[in-house]
Image (tube, rainbow, N blue to C red):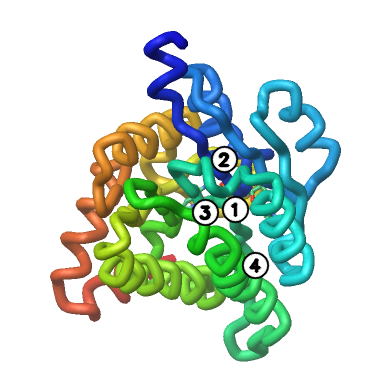
């Protein structure tokens, strides 16, 4: 066995079919790691299949599909080999009229981005060995409040708490938790945005930053720093100042 094969990791990656997840897939596969590529779109998954260790199809909005997928990975003994779980899949939709608050949209985004993680964790955590890693892709949107982001921001703030709290309980199990706060990344998700996205980076740059941080088993990753440090600075200043800036027309 070559040294590379001996150090190759097995990675369970959600949202592998697009954007940041696809870039993570490409970079992990190109360095010899084995990726279990998860997604919703069967055609996109089929394109990854030849280079994936395994593909896994489920809709995050269906607990039954998630449970079935996790059970099948468990029965095939695949989950027991996993070194890194990257919970990256997610969706963003905006509340365009706060006064006419869209409860369905709110529920949909919370379900896709946050509730689904509970079912994934229920399936994966019992099988993870000591030394493995759990990575949550949240958003730098949780550093400060943004207009129209009530659903997306709340789902990601929930992920922040989930990750930070799980880290405490998984310490004794030897499982490390990394929380990721990306800034704006050019992907199909952000291609829909109709506003200026400062310090936009490519999905390849985002994937490189995530992989480097996960390799170092960092607790917290945020990038690009020129955006996230600015947001962190504003979060320390009076809330009225941020309110003026972010609502400026
Ligand atoms: N782009 C940014 O600027 C940015 C910034 C901060 C955080 N993030 C976070 O980074 C993550 C990846 O975002 P992205 O920009 O790469 O988005 P993207 O290009 O739209 O990719 C989203 C991925 O999530 C999967 N997904 C979405 N809804 C799903 C569902 N209901 N069931 C199963 N899979 C589903 C998609 O699968 P299919 O293609 O198979 O549908 C796709 O692989 C998200 O959690 C996002 O919130 C992104």
Q: Nearer the viewer, mark 4 or mark 3?
A: 3
Relative to residue 38, is residue 211 drawn left or right?
left
Disc 1 CB within 8 Å of nearest ligand 1 atom: yes
Q: Nearer the viewer, mark 2 or mark 3?
A: 3
User: Residue tagged by mark 2?
Assistant: 21
> Of all residues shown, which one is farthest toward the top?
2
Disc 2 CB within 8 Å of nearest ligand 1 atom: yes
User: Residue tagged by mark 3?
Assistant: 87
Is 122 situated above or below 54?
below
Residue 189 percent across, percent down from the top left = 62, 49
Marks 4 and 2, the one that precedes in the sequence: 2
Task: Check contact, mark 1 vs mark 3: CB within 8 A.
Answer: yes
Dot 1: few (<14), some (14–19), or many (≥20) neighbours within 10 Å?
many
Mark 3 element type? strand
Indicate the quadrant where residue 45 lies: top right
Q: CA distance from mark 1 to mark 3?
A: 6 Å
Task: Check contact, mark 1 vs mark 4: CB within 8 A.
Answer: yes
Mark 1 element type? loop
Marks 1 and 4, the one that precedes in the sequence: 1
> Of all residues shown, which one is farthest toward the bottom?
99
Task: Check contact, mark 2 vs mark 3: CB within 8 A.
Answer: no
Specify whether residue 88 is in view: yes
Q: Nearer the viewer, mark 1 or mark 3?
A: 3
> Of all residues shown, which one is farthest toward the right?
43
Marks 2 and 3, the one that precedes in the sequence: 2
User: Residue tagged by mark 4?
Assistant: 112
Task: Check contact, mark 4 vs mark 3: CB within 8 A.
Answer: no
User: Residue tagged by mark 1?
Assistant: 89
Task: Check contact, mark 1 vs mark 2: CB within 8 A.
Answer: yes
Mark 2 element type? helix
Task: Check contact, mark 4 vs mark 2: CB within 8 A.
Answer: no
């Amino acid at each position: 066995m070559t040294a590379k094969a001996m150090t190759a990791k097995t990675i369970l990656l959600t949202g592998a079919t697009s954007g940041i997840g696809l870039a993570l897939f490409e970079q992990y596969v190109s360095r010899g790691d084995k990726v279990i590529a998860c997604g919703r779109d069967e055609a996109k998954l089929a394109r990854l299949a030849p280079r994936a260790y395994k593909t896994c199809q489920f809709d995050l909005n269906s607990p039954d599909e998630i449970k079935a997928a996790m059970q099948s990975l468990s029965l095939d003994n695949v989950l027991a080999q996993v070194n890194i779980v990257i919970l990256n899949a997610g969706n963003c939709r905006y509340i365009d009229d706060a006064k006419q608050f869209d409860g369905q949209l709110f529920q949909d985004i919370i379900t896709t981005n946050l509730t689904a993680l509970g079912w994934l964790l229920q399936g994966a955590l019992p099988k993870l060995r000591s030394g493995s890693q759990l990575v949550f892709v949240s958003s730098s949107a949780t550093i400060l409040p943004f207009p129209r982001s009530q659903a997306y921001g709340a789902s990601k703030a929930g992920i922040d708490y989930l990750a930070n709290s799980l880290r405490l309980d998984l310490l004794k199990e030897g499982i490390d938790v990394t929380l990721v706060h990306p800034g704006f990344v050019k992907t199909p998700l952000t291609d829909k945005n109709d506003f200026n996205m400062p310090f936009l980076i490519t999905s390849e740059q985002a994937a490189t930053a995530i992989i480097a941080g996960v390799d170092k088993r960092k607790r917290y990753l945020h990038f690009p720093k020129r955006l996230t440090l600015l947001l962190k600075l504003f979060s320390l200043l009076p809330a009225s100042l941020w309110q003026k800036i972010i609502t400026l027309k």
